[in-house]
Image (cartoon, grey):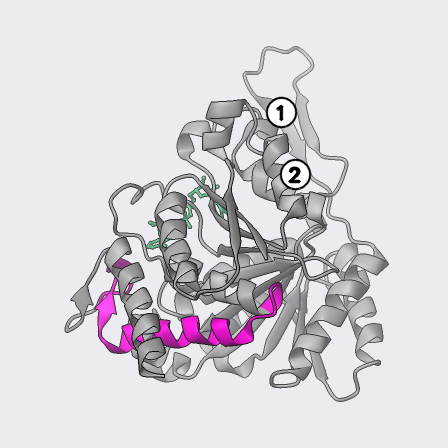
Amino acid sequence: MKIAVLPGDGIGTEIVAEALKVLKVLDLPLELESADVGGMAYDKHGHPLPEATLKLAREADAILFGAVGDWKYDKLERQFRPEQAILGLRKSLGLFANFRPAICYEQLTDASSLKPELVSGLDILIIRELTGDIYFGQPRGRRIAPDGNFPGAEEAFDTMRYSRPEIERIAHVAFQAARKRGKRVTSVDKANVLETFQLWKDVVTEVGQQYPDIKLDHMYVDNAAMQLVKAPKAFDVIVTGNMFGDILSDAAAMLTGSIGMLPSASLNASNQGLYEPSHGSAPDIAGKGVANPLATILSAAMMLRFSLNQPQAADRIESAVSAVLSQGLRTADIFSAGSTKVGTRQMGDAVVAAITKKTTKS
Ligand code: NAD
C-alpha cells in the first residue's frame, strides 16, 4: 500500500507528522513516501505542484495531504500560488467526490458554537463536487482598463458550469452513501437564480428515481446555510456543487467544535483518494506546536477505510481519538474549562498511546 505524503505549508508539517506516528504503530505494510507541495515547493522548485510530486501522487494508492498556503504568496501570479497545487491534484487525478463528515463527538458538545442539545449526536455527511463549478469553468479572467493607466483590473469574471455527466456521477455517490446511513439526501442548489443549478436539480432528481429507497429533497443554498445552524441534525447526506460545498462544509465544521476536528476524503472513480483535514495551513499558529492534529489523524483513518480497505485499522484510530477526548485532553481550539490543554505533539502521542494500550490489552 503506497502512500504519497504531502505535508505542505504552515501547520501542514506539524499535523501530518502526528498522523504518520499514528499510522506507523498500526503495523500495516505501508510504504510512505514524502514530496514537496504548495508554497514550500514553489520556493524550492519554482512550482507549487512539481512534476515529481504529481508523479508520486499518481502512482500512489492514496495521498495524505497536510495543507498549503501562506499570505506571503498572495502577490504571486495565480498559477504559482500554493493553493493551485491542491486544485491541480484534484483535476489531474479526477478527484471529483469530496466527503466531509461533520460528527460532533459527545465529549465536545460544549466546544460547539451552538447549544449542546442542537449538536449532541450530530452525524452528517457533506458530499461536495470537487472538479467542476465556478472554480474550474472557462472562460475566466480580468479585463484591464483600455488606457492601461488603471493600476489593477477594471472587471473580472468566472464561469459557473456543470455538465450532465458531472452531476450524475456525484449524485450516484451521494445516493449510495445515503444507503449506508440514514437514507436521506438533501441536494443543495440555487435553481431559483442560476441556470447551472436548475440543471443540477433536474439531473439529481432524475438520478434519484433509480434510488426509490432514498428520500430526496432539494434546498436553496441560502436556506441550507440557515438550517445548518438552526437544526443541523435534520440533515443526513447533503450533496452540492463545488462552491456551495466549500462554504457549507466550513460552517458545518464549527458545529463539531472546531475545524481542527474535520477530516475529508476526495475520491476518484477508482477509489484512489486524497485525504486531508478540512482546514488550511493556519499561518497564524504555524510553528507554535498548538495546532489540532485530530482532523489529519481522522483523515488517515478515512484513507485506511476508503482507499486501502483496512476498516479495522480505521476503527482503531477513531476509537483512540474518542478515548483521548474522554481523557479530557484538548488542543487550544477545543479547550474548555476543566479539560487538560495539550499541544500538537502531545495530542498525537496520546492517540498513539491509546492505540497501543488497546493492542496490548487485546
Ligand atoms: P485556515 O483553515 O488555515 O484557518 C482558519 C482559522 O482556523 C485560523 O484561525 C486557524 O488558526 C484555525 N485553524 C485551522 N486549522 C486548525 C487546527 N488544526 N488547529 C487549530 N486551529 C486551526 O484558513 P485561512 O486562515 O483562511 O487560510 C490560511 C491559508 O490556508 C490560506 O493561504 C488558504 O488559501 C489556505 N487554505 C488551504 C487549504 C488546503 O490546503 N486544502 C484549505 C483552506 C485554506
Q: Which residue position is annotated with label 2?
A: 55
Q: Quadrant of the N terminus?
A: bottom right
Q: Earlier in the sequence, mark 1 or mark 2?
A: 2
Answer above or below: position of 306 versus 357. above
Tell me where residue 221 appears, x and y as whole percent: 61, 64
- Three-letter amino acid code of the residue under disc 1: Glu
Which of the pair 111/360 is nearer the observer?
360
Q: Residues within 10 Å of mark 1 (few under 14, many from 20)?
A: few
- Three-letter amino acid code of the residue under disc 2: Lys
- Give me the C-alpha separation between circle 1 and circle 2: 39 Å
Proximity of marks 1 and 2: CB atoms separated by less than 8 Å: no
Q: Which residue position is annotated with label 1?
A: 154
Whether residue 15 appears in magenta in the rendering, the answer is no
Residue shown at 50% from the left, 35% from the top:
36
Whether residue 315 appears in magenta in the rendering, the answer is yes
- The reply, left or right, for residue 116 in relation to residue 81 is left
Residue shown at 70% from the left, 57% from the top:
268
- The quarter holding residue 120 reads bottom left
Q: Could you say whether the residue bearing mark 2 is in a helix, strand or loop?
A: helix
Residue shown at 70% from the left, 43% from the top:
92
Tell me where residue 278 appears, x and y as whole percent: 48, 56
